Image: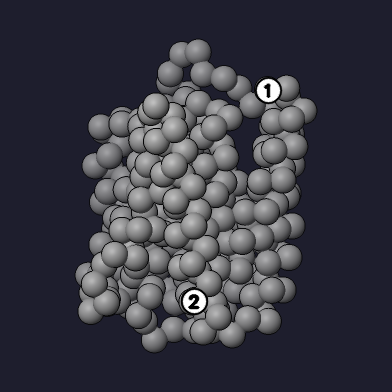
Amino acid sequence: MSPLLVLVILVVSALGTAFLSSIFGMLGGLVLMGVLVNIFPVSLAMLLHGIIQLTSNGYRAWLNREHVLWPIVLSLFLGNLAVFFMLYFMSFVPDRITVLFVLGLMPYIAWLLPEDFSPDVTRKPVGFLAGMVVVGSNLLAGVGGPLLDIFFQKVNMTRYQVVATKAVAQSLGHISKILFFGSLLYLGPGNPDLSAWVVFLAMTASVLGTTMGKKILDKLEDATFFAWTQRIVLGVGAVFILQAIYLLL
């Protein structure tokens, strides 16, 4: 694949997925990881995904900063620390097929949970568990949004509070991923390099997509927001599962 084509795919993907994430508080990272893992080695894809998504989530959190529920963020952060240090010393790097399978299965795990199973992220022990899930799934598959969404399904929060608080939670997860895979790439021999200006363009596209998505979020009703989140993410999950099966054949 030519460098120009890689650049176009990267910038368009960063723009489009940030747009989706800004509306639904998730989904964009799932799609972006699926794109990156198909054009880069897994470790580099994880690092690049972390940088782009940290930009997108961090900016989204800033745009909705008055709606962030900081007590929840503290619980998430403590969970992040616990699982990060546990996995860091394992230095586990999944292969491309594993990543795609996990990406595809995540939305269905959330969907198949019983209706009366409603972990409330506003409770401190549950928030700690959610923080562990974010970093664990980020380091395994590069994405934590679909599983994190389980903890935000049945809470007494507005769509703005959900999007804002999840943006901070996801930012924490992406910071962990950058530290984890960045150190592996730095220490590992023979890893490919990526121009800083290419990464900068992707980050800029991510900010633009986030800004555009915020305008759509302002026009949505809460009921529409929660309904479409599940439908879209299940469809995307199916695509990743089929792709992983194809690679196995």
Q: Residue at x 44, y 77 (%)?
A: 69
Q: Are marks 2 and 1 in contact (CB under 8 Å)?
A: no
- The number of numbered discs placed on residues in the rendered structure image is 2
- Residue 54: horizontal and vertical position, in percent? 55, 51
Seen as rendered, the residue at the extreme front is 249
Quadrant holding the N terminus = top right
Asked if 248 appears above or below 33 in the picture, the reply is above
Q: Which label's residue is closer to the chain start, 2 or 1?
A: 1
Snapshot quadrant of residue 125: bottom left
Helix, strand or loop for disc 2: helix
How crowded pointer 1 is (Cα within 10 Å; few <14, some 14-19, many 20+) is rated as few
Asked if 152 appears above or below 140 in the picture, the reply is below
- 172 vs 24, nearest the viewer: 24
- Residue 183: horizontal and vertical position, in percent? 43, 30
Asked if 229 appears above or below 97 in the picture, the reply is below
Q: Type of residue at label 1?
A: Met
Snapshot quadrant of residue 5: top right
Seen as rendered, the residue at the extreme right is 4
Residue 180 visible, this orientation: no
- 228 vs 43, nearest the viewer: 228
Residue at label 2?
Answer: 227
Residue 28 visible, this orientation: yes
197 sits to left or right of 174 = right
Helix, strand or loop for disc 1: loop
Residue at label 1?
Answer: 1
Q: Residue at x 46, y 68 (%)?
A: 230
Quadrant holding the C terminus = top left
Q: Residue at x 43, y 21 (%)?
A: 187
